[in-house]
Amino acid sequence: MTVSPILSANDAQPSLREMIGQKLMLDFRYFCETGDASKCRKPMTQLPPSLQKLLQTYQIGGVILFAENVQNTEQIVNLTKDLNKVSQTPIFISIDQEGGRVARINRSEATSFTGNMSIGATYPKHGDKYATEVAKVIAKELSSLGINVNFAPTVDVNANPLNPVINVRSFGEDPKLVAKLGAAQVKAFEDRGVISALKHFPGHGDTQVDSHTGLPKVEHALSHVKQRDLLPFAHIIQAQQPGMIMTAHIQYPALDNSTIVNSKGEQMIRPATMSKAIMHNLLREEMGYQGVTITDALDMAGISDFFTPIDAVVETFKAGVDIALMPIPVRTPSDIEKFERFFESIVTAVSEGKLQQPEVATSYHRIMRLKDRIAKFQSSPTAAIAKATLGNPQHRQLEAELALAAITNVKNDGLLPIKPKAGQHIHLIMPDRQKATAMKQALQQATPASIKVTITSLQAYKPERAEQFIADADIVISAHASPQQSAAEIGGMDDVAELKSYELSKQAQPKALLKLMQYAHSRKKASVFISLRAPYEISKYAQYNQAVLASYAYNVDVTDENDVRGPAYTALANVILGNAEALGRLPVSIDMKSLKK
């Protein structure tokens, strides 16, 4: 499909309504033709006529896709084709395909990799090689599907061990390393026609609150914020300007301590998303960014707990942000009626002077320039090409290479590598049965010896039975993933209620794991601990193990209950059994004293 330039000097000026439509990016994660919108959980996998009409009538600028919308390769291609038919200009079709923890497309089809912190762990030996190569593959796969915007890379500097939402989505704690790897990914994405969106400006790395569930506040001094949180953004803007930058729903008093009255009538410090001082004065005038800015999802509690949808959008646009992401849910035909009233309220905000039309026009033209860029790359996707591209052998090989290059040997008191003999018994203590099965399969495939591998799943286990397995075992391998899953990892705000019950079921796991480790230690068992996510937890468990490894990744691809795989588990098994070396390096700091106990 050939697309002509979107806007030239001779084109008629767009109407106010056209400009506002381009400044909205909607999600259609679920859509039900009837029923209560709050209970609708039917994935939108085909564009229904009512949503097509909405997109056309209001000339909506973009949509964001979730896992529910992207269920298989052929279906995704058909959906993106239908989305592109609604407008003569390219529509932004976006997704969160960061790799690692946050990957929306089915892992059995797309190449999902082991994520940013694993890339950070390879930097001392490999530089920006994996940052570049991973982004090339993700861009190639997204392009083949007709997806033209990726909300990546995450360039938050993970300086807080208790950060519940960023952690391994970050390259690490060193701002300069994050900047170099982020810049490499921006170039790799955009050289292949996929717009990148740096996130989350001005930085979400030093928080203990997830902005999906609350409003974080960063209270460091200005000099500290500039040297750490802002540094990656500043470097990348100068080195490789990204097409988009995404805001953070975070209060930064050092950057803007002005206040706003929320919907409850309370004075509060402006979140960065609603701060002109941050989103215009700092980002554009001081740091020189000329591209498109987009909010993080406006349904997140960091905004929606304090502002109505229309107030949130008006304040966001007043701050100079170009695109409002997920400003109002559209789940049923009745929601379309709500959207129509919502849209008219934005038009009214301009006529009443709450929004200035010249500023709306400036935003619109910025968006159109970016769409002109992606139009040069755009072609009609085909299922055949997409199927040949997604998860092809070369891409899977790179995925496996990264997983292995990242494995970090944090402690080894002469235990590794283990060379098991026929009949030896390895007992696994894992967070759940899927991860245990993946680790069991990987160990059995990595050795020619016929070994016995038993499993304790921390999701549901009997302590006495687990202790008996440990007593009988020659080697005990335990693993944990901390912190627990966030809404961003699962999908978004629709998952928060489910997430809370999930977290409750996980609360007892660390204590149970520690007790079993102590039991194995008391029995003088050869013991290995694997940190499957953020490695800060190592300081808690290291003293009870002769060897400690970090993988920064734990995701699996489930073919059936007896065939569960994941690149991190294959890499771990090969390191544990001596088929490969662990050459990664920790990209964050941990308490090293515990390693000597």
Image (cartoon, helix red, strand yellow):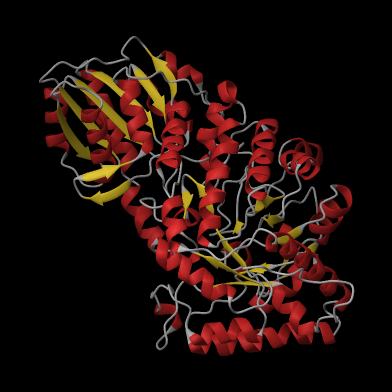
* Relative vertical location of residue 511 with respect to residue 214 in this rendering, above or below: above
Residue with the most extreme top position: 414
* Relative vertical location of residue 248 with respect to residue 449 in this rendering, above or below: below
Q: Give the percent coordinates (x, y) of residue 465.
A: 12, 36
Describe residue 402's horizontal placement relative to residue 455 as left or right: right
Q: Give the percent coordinates (x, y) of residue 158.
A: 60, 38
* Relative vertical location of residue 296 with respect to residue 563 in this rendering, above or below: below
**Observer-nearest of 590 and 334:** 334
For image coordinates 42% across by 35% down, the residue present is 397
**Observer-nearest of 541 and 441:** 441
The quadrant where residue 568 appears = top left
Location of the C terminus by quadrant is: top left
For image coordinates 80% across by 68% down, the residue present is 363
For image coordinates 47% across by 36% down, the residue present is 534
The quadrant where residue 527 appears = top left
**Observer-nearest of 497 and 415:** 415
* Relative vertical location of residue 546 with respect to residue 75 in this rendering, above or below: above
Determine if residue 269 is in view: no
Q: Give the percent coordinates (x, y) of residue 593.
A: 48, 17
Please tell me how many numbered marks the rendered image carries: 0
Describe residue 219's horizontal placement relative to residue 496 as left or right: right
Location of the N terminus by quadrant is: bottom right
Q: Give the percent coordinates (x, y) of residue 567.
A: 37, 37
Determine if residue 81 is in view: yes
Describe residue 456's horizontal placement relative to residue 374 as left or right: left
